[in-house]
């Protein structure tokens, strides 16, 4: 199950109270479905949405995709019942919003019996990011809420430090590369591609999506370019020759460069 979580590059949110959208979301081609009980559902509808999930999932073919459930935050009035319901549903993991301590994550894991993706979206969560990374199965970045919590811009420059800390903490804890936050643009493919490529450059292994129209451009952004694949192929071919000193495009190739080439091949789905 954890390997399925590590392979999730593009999980797509769908409101928990819009069960008719579940099969449409799955058919759009994401890597996972995130059923959202938190921000996407109004307070007065949360209980009914939660209670309807068992029947909806039993009756809906989601094509074998991983199913994630974003529960309500630890201190919300619905949290305890959300976790109890999650323990009875056919889920791959829960997403815990406003994750701020390792204790929150461990408690959610025990109550649900499921792996936990910690959604870091507050200053306190970032302060505790290294202990959170140790406790969680994977980290996701709630960049919009984080920017609001700190009263900063939702821009690359303003969020660079937070993104770097999240990537570093995930790597130090030996966890899969984290999942980056959403792009609010739905139809502007150029921005979605650019944001996805930026996420890759920063060390993220995925991106949260809020609309099916974002899937194709995000997937394009996460895929290596033809030039990158060509370069990686030449590096790996030269490395396989066994020569002590290798030069590609007038640059010397050493062990870290070979590792980078292998990573590009892996992103392209090619055998190394």
Image (tube, grey):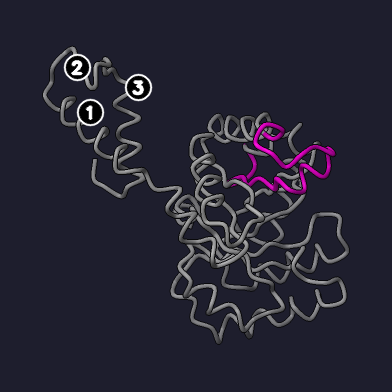
Residue range highlighted in magenta: 134-159
The image quarter containing residue 115 is bottom right
Q: Label 1 vs label 2: CA separation?
A: 8 Å
Residue 34 picture location, percent across and down = 61, 64
Q: Residue at x 69, y 72 (%)?
A: 15
Number of numbered tags placed on the structure image? 3
Q: Nearer the viewer, residue 126 or 80?
A: 126
In three-dimensional space, the C-alpha distance between marks 3 and 1, rounded to whole angstroms, equals 11 Å
Quarter of the figure with the C terminus: top left
Considering only vertical position in the picture, is 219 above or below 211?
Answer: above
Identify the secondary structure beneath mark 2: strand
Query: Mark 1 or mark 2, which has the lower sequence index?
Result: 1
- Labels 3 and 1: the sequence-earlier one: 1
Q: Which residue is mark 3?
A: 256
Q: Which mark is residue 81?
A: none
Camera-nearest residue between 240 and 104 = 240
Q: Nearer the viewer, mark 3 or mark 1?
A: 1
Q: What residue is disc 2 on?
A: 246
**Is residue 120 left or right of 190 when viewed as pictured?**
right
Element on which disc 3 rests: helix
């Amino acid at each position: 199950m954890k390997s399925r979580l590590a392979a999730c590059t593009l999980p797509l949110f769908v409101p928990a109270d819009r069960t008719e959208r579940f099969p449409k979301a799955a058919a759009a081609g994401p890597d996972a479905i995130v059923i959202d009980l938190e921000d996407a559902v109004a307070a007065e509808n949360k209980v009914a949405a939660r209670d309807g999930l068992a029947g909806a999932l039993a009756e809906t073919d989601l094509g074998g995709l991983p199913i994630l459930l974003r529960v309500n935050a630890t201190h919300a009035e619905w949290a305890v019942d959300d976790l109890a319901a999650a323990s009875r549903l056919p889920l791959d993991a829960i997403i815990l919003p406003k994750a701020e301590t390792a204790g929150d994550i461990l408690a959610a894991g025990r109550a649900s019996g499921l792996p936990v993706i910690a959604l870091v979206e507050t200053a306190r969560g970032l302060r505790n990011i290294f202990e959170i990374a140790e406790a969680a199965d994977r980290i996701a970045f709630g960049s919009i809420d984080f920017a609001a919590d700190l009263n900063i811009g939702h821009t690359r420059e303003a969020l660079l430090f937070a993104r770097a800390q999240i990537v570093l903490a995930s790597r130090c804890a030996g966890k899969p590369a984290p999942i980056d936050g959403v792009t609010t643009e739905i139809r502007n493919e150029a921005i979605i591609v650019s944001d996805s490529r930026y996420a890759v450059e920063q060390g993220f292994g995925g991106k949260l999506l809020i609309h099916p129209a974002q899937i194709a451009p995000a997937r394009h952004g996460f895929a290596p370019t033809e030039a990158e694949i060509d370069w990686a192929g030449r590096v790996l071919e030269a490395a396989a020759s066994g020569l002590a000193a290798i030069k590609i495009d007038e640059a010397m190739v050493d062990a870290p460069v070979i590792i980078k080439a292998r990573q590009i091949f892996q992103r392209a789905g090619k055998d190394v």
